Amino acid sequence: MIFKDYYKILGLQTNKVSGSEIKSAYREQAKKYHPDINQRYEERFKDINEAYRVLSDGISKRKYDRMWHRNVGRANSSYEESKRSKDSISSDFFNMFFGTAENKDISKKKVKKEVATKGENIETEINISIEDAFRGKEQSIGVRTVEGNLKKFKVQVPAGIQNNEKIRIVGQGKQGKAGGKNGDLFIRVKIKNDEKFTLDGYNIKTNLYLTPWEAALSTKVTINGINEDVSVYVPAGIQSGEKIEIDNKGYKDGKGGRGKLILDTKIMIPKNPKEEVLELFKKMDEMSNFNPRNG
């Protein structure tokens, strides 16, 4: 039995074609070889319909393509009408590999019922501190199943994860249908600011507390950074609210670098100073003519 090249019947040169290209080719050939134009085209017209019936269905197309790859190089390159019984819409070739047209219709209905469908994805979110996000941390979470049961997971949050970035856990979403794969679980990570650190893009902001004399005289202080102690030079005369920026001491940028550590200066006055300290402040008040309210 000769192998029927359905692609060639539809005027296509390759099987690397989309569904819309197959449909367009079918319309063109059906119009060209319609029996209303010439009665001799009746068998050719049936072959065109048969070819489209196979190639327009994803499952039968894949089955046919496997045969096409094995036979197209050895098949007769010229068109030859398929053999079929009287008044039958299906050729012998079609019936041998795909069953009768009637069985084909039943098979299609059955496939539609049993087609494998991937389950839906599930999305949830967790909150994590800037320090834990910077270093990475194993986090426990719980997700409610469709049945209402609580399913617990341990998730490894990678070091340097970005705010609102998602972690994907394959196969932990809703169950697939008819043998389809389960959906996935997506965990959105929310990085939360705290009293110590604030995240601003790749920069980390924190407060630098100074005494009045440190601000006036200049000093060198050590502060706790996100992952290490950082030595900071404070220039003389720095004002409360001024910022000091330190490169490459901020948050990870995902490319091997880091943002800035930005220090917001806050000059602090002791609440309960010793009497000697108060005397010094009084002397400063008598000696100085500085008035910040005069600009």
Image (cartoon, helix red, strand yellow):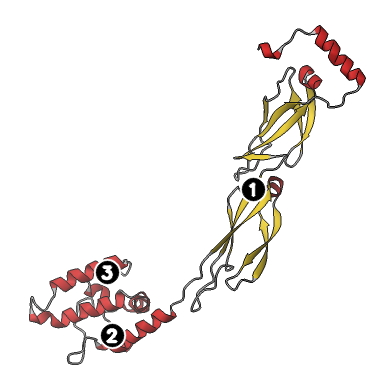
Local secondary structure at mark 2: helix
Q: Could you tell me which residue is drawn at 21 percent across and 77 percent down?
A: 48
Q: Could you tell me which residue is drawn at 16 percent across and 83 percent down?
A: 43
Write down the quadrant of residue 83 in the picture. Answer: bottom left
Residue 110: percent from left, percent from top = 39, 84
Few, some or many C-alpha atoms within 10 Å of disc 1 (few <14, some 14-19, many ≥20)? many
Q: Nearer the viewer, residue 74 or 69?
A: 69
Work out how far the residue at label 2 is from the one at label 3, CA to CA, in angstroms.
Answer: 18 Å
Which label is found at residue 73? none
Q: First in sequence: mark 2 or mark 3?
A: 3
Work out how far the residue at label 1 is from the one at label 3, CA to CA, in angstroms.
Answer: 50 Å
Residue 209: percent from left, percent from top = 76, 29
Few, some or many C-alpha atoms within 10 Å of disc 2 (few <14, some 14-19, many ≥20)? many
Please identify, in this view, whether the residue under mark 1 or under mark 2 is nearer the observer. 1
Residue matched to label 1 = 191
Q: First in sequence: mark 1 or mark 3?
A: 3
The vertical placement of 195 against 246, above or below, is: below
Give, as a three-letter code, the residue at label 3.
Ile
Write down the quadrant of residue 41 in the picture. Answer: bottom left
Residue 13 seen in the current view: no
Please identify, in this view, whether the residue under mark 1 or under mark 3 is nearer the observer. 1
Work out how far the residue at label 1 is from the one at label 2, CA to CA, in angstroms.
Answer: 61 Å
Write down the quadrant of residue 115 in the picture. Answer: bottom left
The vertical placement of 250 against 73, above or below, is: above
Residue matched to label 2 = 94
Q: First in sequence: mark 1 or mark 2?
A: 2
Residue 158: percent from left, percent from top = 66, 53
Give, as a three-letter code, the residue at label 1.
Ile
Residue matched to label 3 = 22
